[in-house]
Structures are given as structure tokens and as C-alpha cells.
Amino acid sequence: MVIHSPSSIDAFTAPERDIIRRELGQHFGSFPSVAEGMFLRVWRAGPLAGKPKLPPAIQTMMARGLVEVQTDRGMPRAFFTQAGLAALRQLAKDRRLLDPVRYAHIRHELGLQTEQAAAAE
């Protein structure tokens, strides 16, 4: 019997892949790091004031144990769990879902390519 691991398409939904691309893409000339987590906004007023705003894509990843929200380091951030990092590696291996040139910094951080291979692409 052959057991298949979930494909990168199965690991993240389309809205989750979209938020990953937005949050881990280049911002204002700098490249974010997976280790720094994904920035979350906070509620400014109302009954949830000071609590992190959780986009639906973050909520679904949290429900499946792919990310966890931490608020102890100042601004809240969503960090990938071990299962989330494994799923992110699978996503990064699929050139159609995460452009290897645009997200070379992520591929390098995840150990999927060396700097020489990134320069060659």
C-alpha cells in the first residue's frame, strides 16, 4: 500500500496561499522572514480593542494547526508551526504556486536552494 503525502495544493487553500504570498513577498524593498512571522493588525476600538485581527485565512490555518498567534513580542504575529513549515516547504517546491525567483528568500530560508542556485535562476 502506498501512502501519499498531501500535495502543496491540498496543504493550503487558495485564500491561505494568497495571504502567504502577500505577507512573505517583498515589502518596501525588504524581504520578510518566515521566522519573523506574519504581521497581524489589532483592533483599535470596541470590545476586542488590543486583540489581534485574524483574517479568515489565518483562522483556517490556526484551526488546522499550521500557524499559531503570538502576542508576547509586541505586535501580534502568526508563526508557522512545525506542520505549517512542512506544508510551506511543499508549497515552495511547487513552482506554479510560489514563484522561485520572487520568493527565493523564502526558499533559501527553508533550505530548498542555496544562494548560488538562487543567483543562477
Image (cartoon, rainbow, N blue to C red):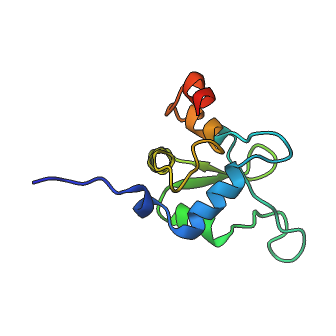
Q: How many marks?
A: 0
Task: Report if residue 100 is visible in the image.
Answer: yes
- Farthest residue, direction bottom: 46
- For the residue pair 50 and 61, the one nearer the viewer reads as 61
Task: Report if residue 77 is visible in the image.
Answer: no
- Left or right of residue 57: residue 81: left
- Classify the position of the N terminus by image quarter: bottom left
Which residue is drawn at the image coordinates 50% and 49% (left, top)?
95
- Classify the position of the C terminus by image quarter: top right
- Left or right of residue 87: residue 106: right
State the image quarter where residue 20 is shown: bottom right
- Left or right of residue 51: residue 67: left
* On screen, residue 115 above or below 15: above
Which residue is drawn at the image coordinates 15% and 53% (left, top)?
2
Image location of residue 32, percent across then percent down: 73, 42
- Farthest residue, direction left: 1
* On screen, residue 105 above or below 65: above
Which residue is drawn at the image coordinates 80% and 50% (left, top)?
75
Image location of residue 47, percent across then percent down: 82, 76
- For the residue pair 119 and 111, the one nearer the viewer reads as 119
Which residue is drawn at the image coordinates 80% and 39% (left, top)?
30
Image location of residue 76, percent across then percent down: 75, 53
- For the residue pair 104 and 43, the one nearer the viewer reads as 104
- Farthest residue, direction top: 116
* On screen, residue 84 above or below 50: above
